[in-house]
Image (tube, rainbow, N blue to C red):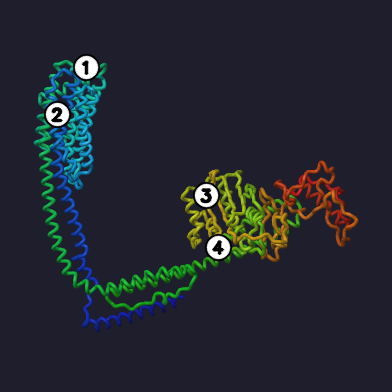
Amino acid sequence: MSGSNRDGRRGRNGARAGRRRRDATDEQAGTAGERRLPLRTVLLVLLLVPSVALVGLWGLATYELGNEYRVQAAQHDLKTTVGPRNAALFNALQRERRLTQEVLAAPGTSRTALIRQRAVTDRALRAFAPLTSADTSDGQQGLAAAISRTVRVTDRLAQERRAVDAGTADEERAFTYYTEAVAAGTEVFAAISRGANGEVTGLSQVLFDLNGAVDMINREDAVLARSWPTGRLSDKDHDLVTDAVGTHEYLLASRVAPNLDAEESRLYTAMTKSEEWRTRVELEEWLQASAGGGVTLSPARAEQWRTSADASIARLVELIVVHNEVSDAAGAAAVRQLKLYLYSVAALGLFAVVLVVLMTWRLTTLLRRRVLAVHGQAQDLGQRLPQVVARLERGENVDVDAEVPELSPAADEFGELSRALNLAGRTAVHTAVRQAEQHRGFERLLQRIARRTQLLIGLQLKKLDELERRHEDPHLLEDLFDLDHLTARLRRYEENLVILAGGQPRRRWRKPVPLLDVLRAAQGEVQDYRRIEIDVEGRPWISERAVGPLIHILAELMENATAFSKPPAPVEIKAAPVSRGVVVEMEDRGLGMEAEQYEAVNALMQAPPQMDVMTRADDVRLGLYVVARLSAGLGLQVELRPSAFGGTRVIVLVPQDLVAERPRSVPDAVGGPSPEEAGTPLPPARRHGGPRPAEVFRPADDADALPVRSRGRAMADVTAPAPADPPTPADPPAPRTGPAPLPRRTRQASLVAELRAPAPQDPQAPSRAPARSGATIAAFQRQSRKNRAAGARPSAPGTDQSEPPTREDRG
């Protein structure tokens, strides 16, 4: 084997050397007609002068810089336009709020100052109103909404003034309205403080905080303005004053002072050290310390407050004006710098693009033909590989040389690339072929091992049948039945291996079988079969070709239902004919699954994958793969749904073409055919409960299978005529030859007609008792040995002297 590999390598190396010599000859012959640049040179040129990438980068950079310049310019214009108008309206509304509170608190005072302030406010409103039609598409985020809200609030100003003049508005209503209007102006300040330039945004944020501090001092002033005439500060107004004091102190100390430049810091320090500022701060501290039961206000303190508050607000406004100038200058400088940067980048980028286009024109012409050839080869390989893999999945044989022929490309870099693609394609196809062969070989090996194991299991079942027929001890029969049940389950597991390996189970039936027997045969292959309750409506029959797979599918689903539900909760199975066939509903009371898991399992049932069992070895749902494969082969519809009990409900729809008619040889009152007709011994028909461990199907193709003893069927063929119908002389019994038959027993023969219970609907229905009556077996054995020894005729009905059974027809 190693020698052949060495010979193959020597042959391939010789072929490569021959191709290189041919390529060198071809290159020498073609140099006169066309010059071929090495790929290394071409890549180096493209790396130094990346024309296409540079064009894209130039266009993108120019667009982004132009867009940024447009946005910053628009935001700067809006800030310089909206800011002063909003500040004028903002300060006017605050002064009108204070004067309105003074007039409402002392109606006898002069209204001259209020009337003059209203005129100032109206001029500010007329200047602010045109801003609603300004173009804010490139402006700060939320600016248009803030302007619209300010206009909507100030539209009610005339109405509120009339209410104040008429005396229908109190101090609280007026204070609330003006505070709302001032808050709308504050939102405008907040909007224009958010910009695309980080430096300008930081300066604008300080300006917004300064206006917020002014608003808090004015709000405090308005609350005190309505309290000075009364001489008392209510608890509610005291809370408003305390909140305003804390807010403006926080804004000035924590957000404004740390972000001021040298000139602004000098102004701020002078402001905070002025006499008026200290006086106002002392009054605020006195108001905060005088909480509880209202605060007594004196005219002297009112005068001190008026002087200090006006001076403090004036100094803050001066600081705002200085900081606004700094912010506007920074914004204008940023716009000019961005404009210069945009023009520079656009000019240099355009020059580079022109240079790239001129230098790459010739190179693109030379390389186009070679690149297209390699590209076509790659596309052909990309289309060929999926087709090869699909053919291998269908089981077809693939020739590597025919699918991917070996090429002899040129000796340059493009030739090496073509050779590498060809080698990769051949390797991929060869690997796929090897993997498919290994997979099919493994499946055949797995099927062969499973078939041999199935033969051993079949022999074991025959041996168990012999032992069950040979022994009559109840305890020994109980153990043999359990062992028979375990062997039937083992046979199903071996069939799982065959199905997962791509095969089909070999159990076949020659004639249709009742659905009830199919269900109970599947029940007999489940470990915890006693928890399964079966209810079949009508007497539907299943076609012979679907009996084996349907038994396997139902057994897997029953096993899953009992495994994932807590004992002793029952597993209910109901079957009934429907318009499209026969439906079997299986419902457990377990934990159920998540909605995603139901979707995944139902998708698996709709389209079972071509599964490699080696890759699914750790999957606990191998039984569902088996169900999916068998269902797809038969055309069954299997669907899992959540149950009302919290578990899972499985619906199996058997299509109409798999439902058979009842054979004519079977009477209507009989639930199934005889063993000779169906090709297999059937378990006793019973609507509820489950079969005993040994009540399992034997396939019809097992020609040399021994008879099977089913629990509860020991006296299934022993019958007796009814007491009311004795044989008549006109119809004498035919003489018998050979050994005497077994004794016959008639139920309730010793009772009068009035005490006899009515006969059950199903004469073959066994009792629900879990074990066979030992007394019945003992009596049957003694009477059988007695008759065989004496050769006597069968006793008359009702004359049997053996020990009576405790429960009839036990299974």
| Residue indicated by mark 2 | 118
Looking at the image, residue 374 sits to the left or right of residue 45; the answer is right
Of 59 and 589, nearer the camera is: 59
| Residue 230 shows in this picture | yes
| Residue indicated by mark 4 | 633
Q: Earlier in the sequence, mark 3 or mark 1?
A: 1
In this rendering, is residue 494 above or below 2?
above
Looking at the image, residue 807 sits to the left or right of residue 788; the answer is left
| Residue indicated by mark 3 | 641
Q: Amino acid at mark 1?
A: Arg
Cα–Cα span, label 1 and label 2: 28 Å
List x then y, in percent, for residue 6: 41, 77
Q: Earlier in the sequence, mark 2 or mark 3?
A: 2
Q: Earlier in the sequence, mark 4 or mark 3?
A: 4
Cα–Cα span, label 2 and label 3: 74 Å
- Element on which disc 4 rests: helix
Mark 4, other Cα within 10 Å: few <14 / some 14–19 / many ≥20: few
The answer to whether marks 4 and 1 mark residues whose Cβ atoms lie closer than 8 Å is no
Mark 1, other Cα within 10 Å: few <14 / some 14–19 / many ≥20: some
| Residue indicated by mark 1 | 232
State which quadrant residue 358 falls in: bottom left
Between tags 2 and 4, which lies in front? 2
List x then y, in percent, for residue 159: 21, 29
- Element on which disc 2 rests: helix
Q: Amino acid at mark 4?
A: Gly
Cα–Cα span, label 2 and label 4: 90 Å
- Element on which disc 3 rests: strand
The answer to whether marks 2 and 3 mark residues whose Cβ atoms lie closer than 8 Å is no
Q: Earlier in the sequence, mark 1 or mark 2?
A: 2
